[in-house]
Image (spheres, rainbow, N blue to C red):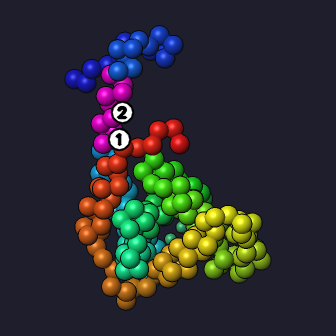
Amino acid sequence: MLKKVDFISMDHGTKNDYDLIAIHDFENERNLFFRVIEWLKMMDGESPYQISRLQHSLQTATRAEEDGADTETIVCALLHDIGDVISPSNHSQVSAALLRPYISDKNYWIVLNHGLFQGYYWMHHYDEDRNARDKFKDHEHYQDCIDFCSNWDQKSFDPEYKTKSLDYFIPMVKEIFSRKPKPFV
Ligand SMILES: [Fe+2]
Ligand SMILES: [Fe+2]
């Protein structure tokens, strides 16, 4: 049976207790990669788009790779919508939070804000400001986020596009989640 801490409230925890938890947390972190793949698989299935959310993610990553993006950026393209599985209404923030300990500040910012930037393609149909993203016009990654949406995300709903498989991208996901996580970001 799994060894347990002695305390029932944290203020009574000892160093030994917290060492035990740290070992568990480390294992949990090490296995994150497997859970990420399972969450991606949950994005398969019916959707009102012509392809599944998983296929959209794979296609976005495929386009990133074909444009010569590095592995980290490809993985961000693959996982940019994974927050949909947990919290559809703020999926960009959830995807970004998952990736943040393993990626650059630039890629974090792009994933975090891609939902707003992607709004350029649909918000005006609902009398909303499609240029709402322009509040970030002076941000150093403004154009990068526009490019992410324009070149990869908004285009990747094409059932005819030669999209690479999930198996193809798994080693890349493993590589990024094998990085030492940045603490307390
Ligand atoms: Fe999205
Ligand atoms: Fe997307």
Residue 46 is at least partly visible in this image:
no
Quadrant containing the N terminus is top left
Q: Give the prevailing secondary structure in the magenta stretch.
A: helix
Disc 2 target residue:
25
Q: Which mark is residue 126?
A: none
| Residue 77 position by quadrant | bottom left
Could you tell me if the residues under marks 1 and 2 are in contact, i.e. CB atoms within 8 Å? yes
Going 33% across and 59% down the picture, which residue do you hit? 173
Amino acid marked by disc 1: Glu
Give the structural element (helix, strand or loop) at label 1.
Answer: helix
Q: How many marks?
A: 2
- Seen in the picture, residue 60 relative to 86 is either above or below; the reply is below
For ligand 1, tell me if the residue under mark 2 lies within 8 Å.
no
Residue 168 is at least partly visible in this image:
yes
Amino acid marked by disc 2: Asp
Residue 127: percent from the left, percent from the top? 77, 77
Q: Is residue 172 left or right of residue 116?
A: left
* Residue extending farthest front: 140
| Residue 132 position by quadrant | bottom right
State the extent of the magenta-drawn residues as a range. Answer: 20-30
Separation of marks 1 and 2 at Cα, in angstroms: 6 Å
Query: Residue 26 in magenta?
Result: yes
Disc 1 target residue:
29
* Residue extending farthest left: 1
Give the structural element (helix, strand or loop) at label 2.
Answer: helix
